[in-house]
Image (tube, grey):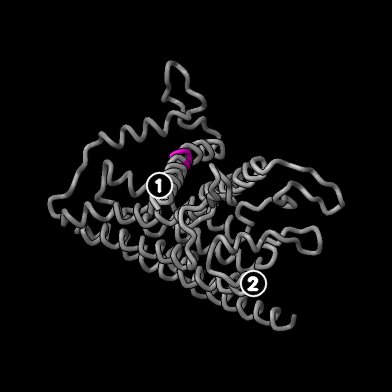
Amino acid sequence: MLVDALIVLAKAVLALAWTLLLALFLTWVERKESAVIQDRVGANRASVMGLRLFGLFQPLADAIKMFFKEDFTPSFAQRALHRLAPALSFFFVSVTVVAVPFGDTVHLFGRAVPLQVVDLSAAVLFALAMLSLGTYGILVSGWASASRFALIGSLRGAAQLISYEAALGLSLVGLVMVFPSLSLARIVEAQGGLLFGFLPRWGVFLQPLGFAVFYIAGMAGTKRVPFDMPEGESEIIGFYTEYGGLKFGLFMFADFLEVIVLAVLSTTLFFGGWQVPWLGGEGFAFPWGGRLALAPWAVSALRVLAFNLKVLFFCWLQVLTRWTYPRFRYDQVMDLGWKVLVPLGVVNILATGLVLAAR
């Protein structure tokens, strides 16, 4: 029992470290990608022993600055809740990754170790619940700041997240109908087959409309352009208007963690997770008849690498979208959620039911 508990603890630490390092790396990706789009050089001043490495040291410099920057709390704020709000947003989004399978089961020292912190039987509901609870960090920050601008931002954020959570949940109903399980591990395993003898049996090919609704609703949940109503960078509002220093850094970090969680869930639910096309436990078996035998450790390594590459792709896509499209008006954001995505989610459920009934 003690060994099992230590293994779970080690996996939790590794998963959290992977998530935080990726979020730190995304701060560099955000700045450099925006610079490339706008024909600028981007952040490149931080250096170690004269080496700049395209600005890769900049996230570390920003983190150090955030730790030592003045932690300002307005005199009119509710201090306890003001301190609690960033921790709420950060905790609920970071804990979501414990239910995500990063790879298949590996054998270490005579033990079968699944590359997943906890295999929850209702992991899909757990992920949606944790993302929903993150709304409390936004509400508490606006209320505790005792600022009308922060309160406007928090109310916008709550209304937006509630609206798009409806579409987010509806988009996953069709997927659960196709892969009858709420366990993320079982859903990934079910995507390991082939369609028509050559096409990976990924959720995106079985639920293309469901994926479109899920991804757009998920992007709205990250509160980034074009859905940055709660933050309003071009306006004098934002639920973290009265925050600075490390507390502001936690809010910013939570935003990047939400980007990672959306990328992870998109990969896991719709793009096969750690599955690699035509790769089985003994190696590749190609549709045209060729085979390539691989050692078990090489198969596991390729699967973990495939998962990470898919996640990085969706992170890059979200950053690209953020610096490509203009922000919507508030009424446009609400109309898109209730008048477009929710009806499309219902249509997807009905279409999926008809197809399954006709089989």
**Residue 190 visible (yes or no):** yes
Number of the label disc, if any, that sits on residue 200:
none
Task: Give neighbour class at mark 2: few <14, some 14-19, many 20+ (Cα, 10 Å).
Answer: some
Secondary structure category for the residue under label 2:
helix
Tag 1–tag 2 contact (CB < 8 Å): no
Number of the label disc, if any, that sits on residue 6:
1
**Is-magenta flag for residue 262?**
no
User: Which stretch did the figure color magenta?
Assistant: 22-26
Disc 1/disc 2 C-alpha distance (Å): 36 Å
Residue 31 screen position, x and y as percent: 47, 38
* Amino acid at dot 2: Val
Residue 130 screen position, x and y as percent: 40, 62
| Quarter of the image where one finds residue 85 | bottom left
**231 relative position to 358: left or right:** left
Residue 123 screen position, x and y as percent: 48, 64
Residue located 57% across and 67% down the image: 213
Task: Give neighbour class at mark 1: few <14, some 14-19, many 20+ (Cα, 10 Å).
Answer: few
Residue located 64% across and 72% down the image: 178
Q: First in sequence, mark 1 or 2: give its number.
A: 1
**Is-magenta flag for residue 23?**
yes
What residue did someone put label 2 on? Answer: 178
Above or below for 128 versus 77 = below
- Comparing 306 with 331, the one in front is 306
**155 relative position to 11: left or right:** left
Q: Main secondary structure of the magenta part?
A: helix
Above or below for 230 versus 332 = above
Secondary structure category for the residue under label 1:
helix
**133 relative position to 218: left or right:** left
